[in-house]
Amino acid sequence: MCRDSNGSECLTTTPSLWRRVRPVLLIASLLLVCSAAVAAPAKPRGVTLDVKDADVHAVLKSIQKQCGIRNLVIDPGVTGSGTFLFHDVPCKVALDTVLRVNGLAAKTYSSSVVAVAPR
């Protein structure tokens, strides 16, 4: 152990001190990295879709999955198909386009329920 001229313990980094401090430094570093990742703003979701003559049900389900729509209710009268080529299109724009092309309308009941029916 290191002692100075007064008999007090030295403040030098001894191997045993380093073994005690190192895990704390590692944990602190991880917390900083994790908090930075959580605090970073999420990238807005976009729809990427490349389909030809696809059934509207399949297209709507793909949009639901890509946009994080938790509950999608599709009326039994919903029919149609279309060709869509979207690359990172905002969710609302993609959904509105598919609905308009197929003569459909959507009603949002809450942030997690969207119902689609013929106009």
Image (tube, rainbow, N blue to C red):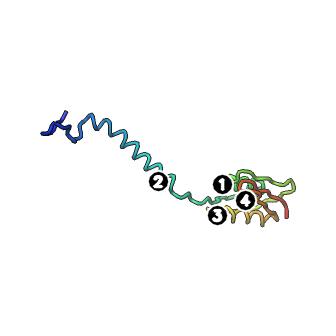
The mark that comes first in sequence, 3 or 2, is: 2
Q: Toward which corner of the image does residue 86 lie, by quadrant?
A: bottom right
Image spot of residue 69 (x, y percent): 70, 54
To which residue does mark 4 refer?
Answer: 52
Assess disc 2: are there few (<14), some (14-19) or many (≥20) residues with their C-alpha within 10 Å of its C-alpha: few
Q: Mark 1 to mark 4: distance in Å?
A: 18 Å
In whole angstroms, how far apart are the C-alphas of marks 4 and 2? Answer: 41 Å
Asked if residue 82 is positioned above or below residue 12 in the image, the reply reads below
Residue furthest to the right in view is 77
Residue type at mark 4?
Lys
What is the spatial separation of the Cα atoms under label 3 and label 2, in whole angstroms? 27 Å
Q: Which residue is mark 1?
A: 66
Identify the residue position indicated by label 2 in the image.
36
Q: What residue do we see at 47% from left, 51% from top?
A: 35
The residue tagged 3 is: 89
| Tag 3–tag 2 contact (CB < 8 Å) | no
